[in-house]
Every structure is written in structure tokens, then in C-alpha cells.
Image (cartoon, rainbow, N blue to C red):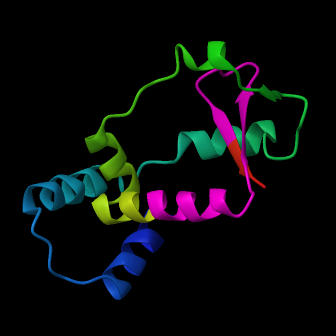
Amino acid sequence: MLLLSCSLLNKFTATYNEDTDFTDTLVNIIKERIDKKNLLEQRILEGKWDSRRVIWEDANQDCVLGFPELTMDDLKILTLGEYQLSMGENYNNEYLRADSSYSFRVHKEEPNVIKVRSR
């Protein structure tokens, strides 16, 4: 998945990048993780989390109290840059104007795992 994401970014995004420190950081992270397995994906597949409804419950205020917080740098790394973050914000604003909503569900046994659905 990571290789596909990188290939798409290389093909369809501009090459100019003024945040070279972030680019260097991102490249180092990619090199470090390129051969690592996606442990969350393995757990989802092994536990069949994607097809079992009984393991998920509606999120509430109490569920998020211990949920890990991400910094802006974490989000930039996760989304591969600031542009994607701004596009996500724009997409969200357009989506919510269209009378749509999100549902947040928390895994009953793994409280640090959430599932978000849009309707």
C-alpha cells in the first residue's frame, strides 16, 4: 500500500516542495518501514473485524478520553503532507454540507481502534 501511495504521489503531484526537512523526515520513515508488515491490517484480517458487527460499539465521550492524540506532525506523516490535510478539511466541509454524517465506532476489546463510516 505504501509503495502504491508513493508511486501515485510521484506521478500526479508537483515536484516543488519548500518543506525539505519534512520531505527528508518522510523519506527516512518510508525507508525505515518499507519492509515492515502492517500489524493492524493483519489483526483486522485474522479477527475478521471488517465483517463482524458485534465487536464494534458506538463511540461516546468516555471512549475518547484515553484515545491517543496525534500532533500536526503526526498527521502530516500519516497523510504524506500538508496538502492532503487541507484537502481533507475541504472535503469534510463539502461532505457535511450535503446532509451527510459520520459514525464513529470503537472496538470493544481494543479501545485504541476506531472505525469511521460516512453516510
Residue 81 showing in the rendered view? no
x and y, in percent, of residue 56 in the image: 81, 30
Would residue 81 be counted in the magenta stretch?
no
Q: Residue at x 58, y 24 (%)?
A: 112
Query: Is 46 situated above or below 10?
Result: above
Left or right: where 119 falls relative to 24: right
x and y, in percent, of residue 29 in the image: 26, 50
In magenta, the rendered stretch is 88-115
x and y, in percent, of residue 22 in the image: 16, 55
In-front residue for pair 60/15: 60
Would residue 93 be counted in the magenta stretch?
yes
Q: Residue at x 39, y 50 (%)?
A: 78
In-front residue for pair 110/41: 110
So how many labels did they put on this image? Answer: 0
Left or right: where 109 falls relative to 97: right
Residue 89 showing in the rendered view? yes
Q: Residue at x 74, y 46 (%)?
A: 45
In-front residue for pair 96/36: 96
**Quarter residue 49 falls in:** top right
Left or right: where 51 falls relative to 30: right
Query: Is 80 situated above or below 77?
Result: below
Query: Is 96 situated above or below 53?
Result: below
**The C terminus - image quarter:** bottom right
x and y, in percent, of residue 71 in the image: 31, 35
Q: Residue placed farthest to the bottom in the image?
A: 11
Q: Residue at x 36, y 76 (%)?
A: 9
